[in-house]
Amino acid sequence: MAKGIYNWIDERLDITPMWRDVADHEVPEHVNPAHHFSAFVYCFGGLTFFITVIQILSGMFLTMYYVPDIINAYASVEFLQTKVAFGQIVRGMHHWGASLVIVMLFLHTLRVFFTGSYKAPREMNWVVGVLILFVMLGLGFTGYLLPWDNKAYFATKVGLQIADSVPVIGPYVKEFLQGGTIVGAQTLSRFFALHVFFLPAVLLALLGGHFFMIRKQGISGPL
Amino acid sequence: MAHGHNSKEKVVYVGDSRIRQRSERATPPDYTAYPGKSEAFIPNFLLKEWMVGCVMLVGFLVLTISEPAPLGYPADPTNAAFIPVPDWYFLFLYQLLKMPYASGDYVVLGIVGLPGVLFGALLLAPFLDTGKERRFYRRPIASAMMFISLIGVVYLTVTSWAGYQEELKLTGTTPEHIVREEEARDRALAGLPKESKVKKEAEIALVAPDDPAMESMKVATCLGCHGTDLKGQSGPSLRGIGDTLSEEQIMDVIKNGKQGAKGNMPPMYDSAKTQGLSDEQINGIAAWLAKQKKAE
Amino acid sequence: MSNHNEHEKQGNERKEMSRRQFLAYTLGGTTAFMAGGVTLPMIRFAVNPLLEKKDKGALIKVVEESKITNEPQEFSFQKHQVDGWYESEAKLSAYISKGEDGKIFALSPICQHLGCTIGWNSDKNYPNEYHCPCHGAHYTKDGKNLAVAPRPLKEYEMEIKNGFIYLGDLMDNTRVK
């Protein structure tokens, strides 16, 4: 049955080559932990992606309850954490996943750096990867404010103060991020938009580029 | 598919589309004959990768179940005692800005100079380190710079965290989310229901609710718009009205009406008279409403 | 059709599972485990409103029994409503009257056609009936649907204690079918 449906679609759209290309590509021995245990360092990139997927999913589910509004934000987070079944776990996934994704990204970056994998012809992929790191840090910063508790509020104030002291553009950046002259209702709504729409969109585009380049160039050879 | 047999000789398309009709099934390549031990991504390699993924996932789930995500008390901008601390991965930057040559007059160096140069160098690493050599011990400059940055970041993070702990000890504060968790645990042990930390806006109570003015207001049809509980319906709430309007001003509104945010209130004085209220009773309404002040 | 025969031949030659197939199945299982481990808590989280125990609404004191006449009268009352993190006093109203049988009953003023608010004797063409201004649905005093609406008016659960009428949740009309 499933095979029949697949064949029917395949005949019309010729989808087999698309996934075959991904599925059948050759993975060299030196990245396979089954051959050299030390090759586990090559797993960090994949793990980063796996946690990113968890982040996207848990974030999507959290917005089923969360409201980005200074009166209700805290109440809704408290509600989903304490009153909704598995709310503590789903929010926990998003909270701890945010830290873990940074850890994994960090390890992945170090692996790529110390194996010299960023060298020609893979310079562009390194640049894209570092941009992904920046976007992740941006996601961490904007996400921190959303529960609207004291920690969120004051850490964001400090963060924006830091942005403010950048010469020339600082005050403008601060006011743009704040959406006004104080950290308040408009800041929360802005941070929510950045955290949920803008930065993830950029992240997905960069990830697409990252994977495309990996497939095109292959994994860097053994040292 | 009558023309299927010719597919080897010339390209045949499906219908009038641009999809080529294939007759052979795609066979997965077999890498076992290759020198070295390369393998196909699916299923061979991905299975191994996902074994690692499973181990991490189990650890991750254990963490999320055992350690709830922290949540403090609702943000209160007037809370001066709160010691702000960013998420741990920003601590190094936070600490850097406390260093003598990165703050005060040198703040530009601290914010743009050092982090800018470091992150810029990270971003442009492939263009700075252009040699062919890949092994890290054969490119001492790049590796040394990375090691120094790493040590610096770790040092700053650790000092920042230690400083935060020190400050907590000095001021004798426990972070809110921990206070909250302990409180929740105590309540759970005592069999009490979960408690919300959301501050409820106190409802403004009626002052002297048994005053005859309430009855007069019913007769004068005030309650039709302002609500039987004076909390407002099509007209605004009158609870706490004494905080904004004096007795004379209220009387003025009764006599002349008002253009308010919720719509226009017509002059009610004459209509109240026709309903049989005396001037005294109407004055009573104004006096009573002027007494409606928010309890301190 | 030649490829079909070829495939069949291959299938006959090898009956037992190939190494590749075994790996593919294991990979499928692992994938299912990982996907399940990640998404099951989230799905339970999302469907929570469906599985939550709905507590029966408390009965609310509305009006003295002595005020009820054969003519339906509208009474409004407030109900404390907890909607997730939002608590409010919902304003509800009911038409309460004595039926032919002398029993007191309370009807909801929500039209069962499309949810507009009906009124008693509000249209001259339908004397002594509930009439809905939106699409002309009208109901008898007992709430029986006479036109447009597919169901009779809902009734409030009711209790009379110490001369006061208490109203609870909405239920299907018990006076008419």
Image (cartoon, coloured by chain):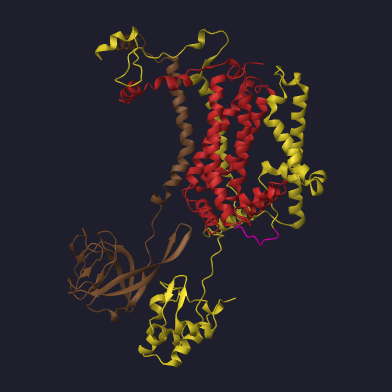
Q: Would you say residue A51 is visible in this rendering?
A: yes
Residue A86 spot, x, y in % from top left: 49, 46
Left/right of residue C137 with respect to residue B221 in the rendered view: left
Q: Residue at the location (56% across, 41% down)? A: A199
- The quadrant in which residue C95 appears is bottom left
Q: Is residue B33 above or below residue C69?
A: above
Left/right of residue B112 with respect to residue C71 in the rendered view: right
Q: Quadrant of the N terminus of chain A?
A: top left
Left/right of residue A39 with respect to residue B92 in the rendered view: left
**Chain letter for the yellow part:** B
Left/right of residue B101 with respect to residue C21 in the rendered view: right
Q: In which quarter of the image is the C terminus of chain A?
A: top right
Q: In this view, does A75 lie above or below C1?
A: below
Q: Residue at the location (51% across, 23% down)? A: B46
**Chain letter for the brown part:** C
Q: Nearer the viewer, residue A144 or B128?
A: B128
Residue B3 spot, x, y in % from top left: 26, 12
Q: Is the magenta stretch mostly helix, strand or loop?
A: loop
Q: Would you say residue B159 is visible in this rendering?
A: no
Q: What stretch is highlighted in magenta?
A: B73-81
Residue A21 spot, x, y in % from top left: 47, 19
Q: Nearer the viewer, residue C25 or A132?
A: A132
Residue A106 spot, x, y in % from top left: 65, 33
Q: In this view, does C147 lie above or below C71?
A: above
Q: Residue at the location (48% across, 36% down)? A: C37
Q: In this view, does B62 lie above or below B171?
A: above
Examine the structure image and report whether residue C8 is included in the region drawn in magenta. no
Of the chain colours in the picture, the one used for chain A is red
How many numbered marks appear?
Answer: 0
- The quadrant in which residue C121 appears is bottom left
